[in-house]
Image: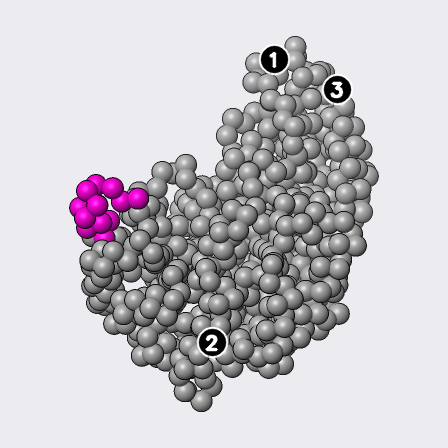
Amino acid sequence: MDGLEDLKRREASWEEGRAKNITFIVTEDCQLRCKYCYLVGKNPGRRMDFGVARQAVDYLLGARELFDDPSVIWEFIGGEPLMEIELIDRISDYIKLRMYETGHPWFNSYRFSLSTNGLAYDDPRVQRFIFKNRTHLSIGITIDGVREKHDIARVFADGRGSYDAVVRNIPLWLRQFPDAATKVTVAHDDLPYVKESVLHIWNLGVKTVNINVVFEDVWQPGDDTLFEAQLVGLADAIVDGELYREYDCSFFDATIGQPLDPADNQNWCGSGKMLAVGAKGEFYPCVRFAPHSMGNKRPRAVGNCADGVNANLLRPFLALTRLAQSPPECAACEVASGCAWCQGLNYEAAATDTIYQRATYICLMHKARVRANRYYWDRLRRKRGGNIC
Amino acid sequence: MLTHLLVLVDGSAPSFCHYGHDRRITELMPLAVLERTVAFAHDRRLALTYVPGREELPPEYRAVMDNTAHAAIVPAGLAGRYPDAILVVDADGNDGSAGGAAGERRQFILRLPRHRLAAMADLVRDCLGRASRLNVYLGDIERYTAADIEEYGRQLELAAGYVAAVYRQGSLPEVNIFSDRMLLSAMNNCDAGVVHLTAAPDGKLYICPGFYYDGEQPAGSLEDGITLANRQLLTLANAPICSCCDAFHCKRCVYLNNKLTLEWNTPSREQCVLAHLERNAARLLLDRLGSVPPFSRLRAIPAVDYLDPFDQIPTRRLQP
C-alpha cells in the first residue's frame, strides 16, 4: 500500500516536485488485509466508474488556471489498483487522448504511477498495460522483507501470508524496471526483522528500500530500543560489507536529527498539494482522507468532479505550517529534522475535527532512528577517512 | 485568558454578529440555569453580557440579571427598557425605529443580511447621528458571490463618504469597519473561545452563539467548566494566514472559519477579501481626513496589492 512518504519521495525523484500528483482511487478493494494498513474500510462495492474518471479528467485538464504545474503524475491507487487494470488502461488511454487533443502542456511531461502488492503483476492484462505505457510508467511492488516479516503483516483475508505470491514476480518486475524501489513498512510485530529484511530485499536485487515506521499508535515500551538495535546492526552490515556503494535504505539520512529553525516552517506532508479522486468522483487532499481510510472521522472532501475544487475547503491544507500543528515539545525538539507526520492520521487521531493537531506516536522511534543514524554516519566517516559522500 | 461570558437568555434573540438562525419562538434559558450561569461567572470573575430576546423578560429574570454588574445586547426596539445596552438594529426594520432617547448616543450593532447589502451605506448613515459606536456585521457570508463582494466595495465607498462628513463636523462615532483599523497597530479580533464563551439556554458553554445555533459540540458546561480540546487553535499564534495579515480590525470569526473551511484557524477567501476591502476603505478614508484632528495623528495604513493574504504565502496556490 502506498503512503505519503512514497508520494513525496517519488515527486522528488521525477520532476523534483514540479509535478502535480493526481491519484485515482479506482477501487476500495484489495486481496490482502495487511495488518498495518490505514485503509480500514476495504470493500468490494466501491469501484470507480469510467464515466466518473472521464468527468474528472475533463475537469482537471480544463482547469488549467488551477493546475498549472509543469508536469503531472497520474497515479492509480486502491485498495489494490491492479484489480482494476482494465479500468486503469481505459482511463490512461483517455488521459493521453485528451491531453493530446486539448494541446495540454502535460502531454509532454507526464507519468503514470502505480504501487501494487504485486500479486497480479504477471497477469497478461497488466503486462499489456506495462508494455503500452512503458516509456511513461513507474510501478512499485511492495515486498516487506524476509518471509517472516512480510507474512506477519501482509496477509490474505484468510490469514495466509503473501510472501511467495509476491516474491515470484520480483524478477520480472526488475527486468522491466531495473531501478525500481520498494516500500517497506515497519510496525510493532515485525521490529525484530528490520535488519535482515533490508538485506534480503537488496539480495533480491531491489537496490533502493524506502522504509518507514507506521505513524499510528502501535508502539510499546522498549520498541525504540529494539528498533535502534536493528538499525545499528544494519549499519554495521552496510559499513562492513561496503553495501553503501550500491544500495540505499531511507532509514539512513545524514540530514535528520537536527533542531529546526522557526523559519523552517513548511508542512512536511504533501496532503492538499496532491489531489485524490474518489470512486464516486469526490476530490480529497490525498487518499488518506477518503471514506475507506477513515475509522472514526468523517471523510474530508475538497470538492468533486462535477463542481470542481472547493478552494475554501482546500485552504487549511495549503496553509498548514509545521509550527501551527505541532505541540510545544515538537517545536522545541533538538532532533526535529526528519521527523515526519501524516496529515490523515493527524486528522483521525485529533481530539477535534482538525488537521492542525500533530500526532506524535512516533516520537521515540524517530529519536531511536536519529541515534542509529549518528552511529551509522560516524562509522562511515571513520571508515572513509572523514568523507561520507 | 477567559474574561467574559455571554449569556443567551433567550435563544430566539436576533443575531448580533455574523451567525444567523431562524428561531422565532421564545426559548428562555430556565431560571435555575440562569442562576447557575451567574454563579459560574462570579466564581471565575467573568464579566457578564446578557442577550435577551424581543419579548420582555419575566421580573424574576431581571432580578437575577440586575443583581450583578453586566452589559446587554438587545434589539433596538427595547432601548427604553435597557438604558445602557448595546442596540441591535434589524436591517429589515422589524423592530421599529432604532431606539434611544432623542439626543442620546448609544452603541449600535447593524447586522446586515445579504439581501439588504445594497442598503448598507444608507443604514450606516441613519445610525451615525445616534451612535457613539457602530458595529456593522455582515450575515450570510457563506452565500456571498463575487457580485456581492463587489457591491460591498461600493457600499463601503458610499458609507465612507457619510462617515467622513460626520467626522469633519467634529462628531467622532467609531465605526468598526473604518475606524478600528485606523486605531489599531496589532490584531484585535473577536477571540471567541479564548477571551469569551457563550452560555446557551441548554446550560452548555459554546465558543460563540453561532456554534450553539449550528448544533456544534459544546465547549463545556456549567458543571464541568471548559472541556474544549485544541483550544490553542482559536488563537492567532496558531492561525497561519491570519498571523501574517494586517487587517487588524478583522473579527477573525472562528464560527465562519469553521463553517466555510472546517477549521477554526483558517478563514475563507470571502472573509479575507471582505476584511481587506474594509482595510482599504479605512486607508482611503484616513487619507481623506489627513488634516482633520485627530486623524492627522494616526499612522497611515500602507497600500497593499492583494485582497487575500493567502495569496501572499508561497506555494499556496490553487485559487479560483
Screen quadrant of the N terminus of chain B: top left
On whether disc 3 and disc 2 are found on a single subunit, the reply is: no
Which residue occupies the extreme front position in the image?
Answer: A175
Q: How crowded is the residue under tag 3: few (<14 C-alpha within 10 Å), some, or many (20+)?
A: few
- Label 1 amino acid? Ser
State the residue position of label 1: B296
Residue B68: percent from the left, percent from the top? 47, 47
Q: CA distance from mark 3 to mark 2?
A: 82 Å
State the residue position of label 2: A169
Magenta stretch? A376-389
Q: Quadrant of residue B287?
A: top right
| Chain containing the residue with disc 2 | A
Residue B167: percent from the left, percent from the top? 69, 19
Question: Vertical placement of A156 versus B51: above or below?
Answer: below
State the residue position of label 3: B165
> For this rendering, which residue is in front, A230 or A208?
A208
Residue at point 63% right, 77% down? A125
- From the viewer's perspective, tell me whether residue A363 is left or right of residue A285: left
Residue at point 78% right, 52% down? A102
- Label 2 amino acid? Asn
Question: Vertical placement of B30 versus B289: above or below?
Answer: below
Q: Dots 3 and 1: beta carbons under 8 Å?
A: no
Residue A109: percent from the left, percent from the top? 63, 50
Q: Dots 2 and 1: beta carbons under 8 Å?
A: no
